Image (tube, grey):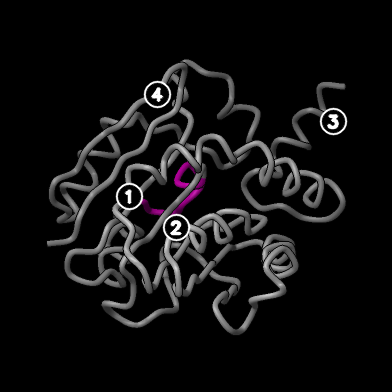
Amino acid sequence: MKNIFKDFFSQCARPEGFLGRVMLRFMNFGHAPLTNWGLDHVAFLNCMTMADIGCGGGATLKRLLKRSQGSKVYGIDISEESVAKARNVNKQLLGNRVFVEQGSADRLPWDNQTFDVVTAVETVYFWPNLPKCFQEVKRVLKPGGQFAVMLEVIEGDSAWPSVVEGMTVYSPEQLKDMLEQAGFSDVEVFRKKPSYATIKGILK
């Protein structure tokens, strides 16, 4: 039973196969409250161009579209299974207002100054070389663009990093410092009990 538990939650990092598909359905449903609350801290306008990094099953892409009329959203995920799921979830608008591809947060495939908003929901735990990833986000944001990181706060003594392979725990304050070091301005930490946090920075 312990091995099954570990195998399932290790799918958080890079969903693959049957367990990965189950995890993606779980993520799309389970991350909804955090995402909807976190997006309340982003200033949306109509006709924005937005990206979700580590887009998982694609539910956040749909939520972003609802916040900005006439917008376009781009998703990227390292998992082939995630890309397939995100495309299927958004199939009605795929290739028109929704674009999803496979790739890594440390090497984003987009041009400089492309996006008004970039989000990352429950995913920075798994990004390689986080400072480099944050520089990539900075590169693809337009001046005045917003970057919002949403996560459930995991305490440093949590067992999760030993259960989920490749997971690194960061506190909201650590992420705030890293965003400021990356050159983001007006970085704020928003919290909601019991464990939700959103860290938002603006590219000046």
| Residue 81, above or below 49 | above
Q: Earlier in the sequence, mark 3 or mark 1?
A: 3
Q: Residue at x 62, y 47 (%)?
A: 13
| Cα gap from disc 1 to disc 4, whole angstroms | 15 Å
Q: Which mark is residue 6?
A: none
Residue shown at 77%/55% (left/top)?
A: 16
Residue 49: image location, x then y, percent = 39, 73
Q: Nearer the viewer, mark 2 or mark 3?
A: 2
Q: Position of residue 171 (x, y in %)?
A: 35, 29
Helix, strand or loop at mark 1 = loop
Residue under circle 4?
192
Asked if disc 1 and disc 2 are in contact, CB closer than 8 Å, the reply is: yes
Mark 1 vs 4, N-terminal side: 1
The alpha-carbon separation of the residues under discs 2 and 3 comes to 38 Å
**Relative height, residue 39 to residue 138 (above, below):** above
Residue 106 placement, left or right of 77: left
**Which is nearer the N-term, disc 2 or disc 3?**
3
> Magenta residues, as a range?
123-130
Residue under pointer 1? 42
Q: Secondary structure at mark 3?
A: helix
| C-alpha separation, residue under disc 1 versus residue under disc 2 | 10 Å
Q: Earlier in the sequence, mark 4 or mark 2?
A: 2
Q: Quadrant of the N terminus?
A: top right
The crowd level at tag 2 (other Cα within 10 Å; few <14, some 14-19, many 20+) is some
Q: Is residue 128 magenta?
A: yes
Mark 3 or 4: in front is 4
